Image (cartoon, rainbow, N blue to C red):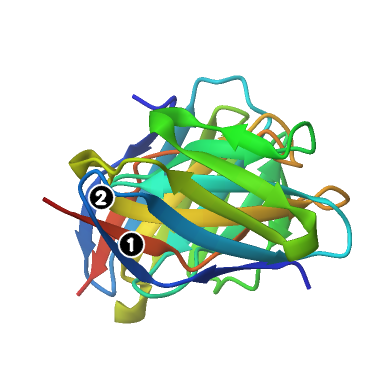
Amino acid sequence: AQSVTQLGSHVSVSEGALVLLRCNYSSSVPPYLFWYVQYPNQGLQLLLKYTSAATLVKGINGFEAEFKKSETSFHLTKPSAHMSDAAEYFCAVIRNTGNQFYFGTGTSLTVIP
Amino acid sequence: ETGVTQTPRHLVMGMTNKKSLKCEQHLGHNAMYWYKQSAKKPLELMFVYSLEERVENNSVPSRFSPECPNSSHLFLHLHTLQPEDSALYLCASSQDHGGRGGYTFGSGTRLTVV
């Protein structure tokens, strides 16, 4: 079955510290991978996506993610956390032969001043 | 404004009421989706429409009835709901049914069933 696993439902970092949100996928074929962010009382907003062009993907708001096939991972990082980064982050996958998104359970990011 | 507009933003309804959620997209997308987001649970795909035809219905109770009159509009008709149906209902659209370019989400309707 196609799925993603987000390790850690809650992550806290200090303002200015590195942000690392983990996502592992299960797939027998190269997938399409996405990270979305959800601010309180809002819908999901696309941060970045991997579609097999480049393994390091840069997104909005200074976030980036690296596709590592050997580790079946697509972790999201940001060098320096900002207070405005506090939100829920979702990893999602769609198999390139399929047509349905599978979302992870989400990671809530707290940024401590 | 994200390009996908959902109304109303908040809705409180009794279990015997009938109400509808509306979703509108101005992105020229051909596929639209309804998701249910409940606390501490993964997003649940409810319905998928591609070119105005329903292509997926993920075992959703019949008290939820979708309607897609054209490629820009999607409705979710609600009747005789249960308290456990209280959730954030998200509409999304994508260029095509595959969604490989990603989905664009609306801000959601926060539904409370009393």
Whether residue A104 is visible here, answered yes or no, is yes
Q: Which corner quadrant of the image does residue A58 belong to? A: top right
Relative image position of residue B45 (x, y in whole percent): 58, 61
Secondary structure beneath disc 2?
Answer: loop
Whether residue A101 is visible here, answered yes or no, is no
**Nearer to us in this view, B57 or A10:** A10
Label 1 CA crowd tier, 10 Å (few <14, some 14–19, many 20+)? many
Q: Is residue B12 left or right of residue A72?
A: left
Q: Are marks 2 and 1 on the same chain?
A: yes
Instruction: Determine which residue is flagged by label 1.
Output: A108
**Nearer to us in this view, A103 or B106:** A103
Amino acid type indicated by mark 2: Ala
Secondary structure beneath disc 1?
Answer: strand
Q: Could you tell me which quadrant the N terminus of chain A lies in?
A: bottom right
The residue shown at (45%, 37%) is: A63
Residue under mark 2: which chain is it in?
Answer: A
Residue A108 sits above or below residue A99 on the image: below
Q: Which mark is residue A20?
A: none
Amino acid type indicated by mark 1: Ser
Relative image position of residue A107 (x, y in whole percent): 40, 63
Residue B8 sits above or below residue A53 on the image: below
Q: Is residue A55 left or right of residue A102?
A: right
Q: How far apart are the alpha carbons under marks 2 and 1?
A: 8 Å
Relative image position of residue A41 (x, y in whole percent): 25, 49
Instruction: Determine which residue is flagged by label 2.
Output: A86
Q: Is residue B7 left or right of residue B26?
A: left
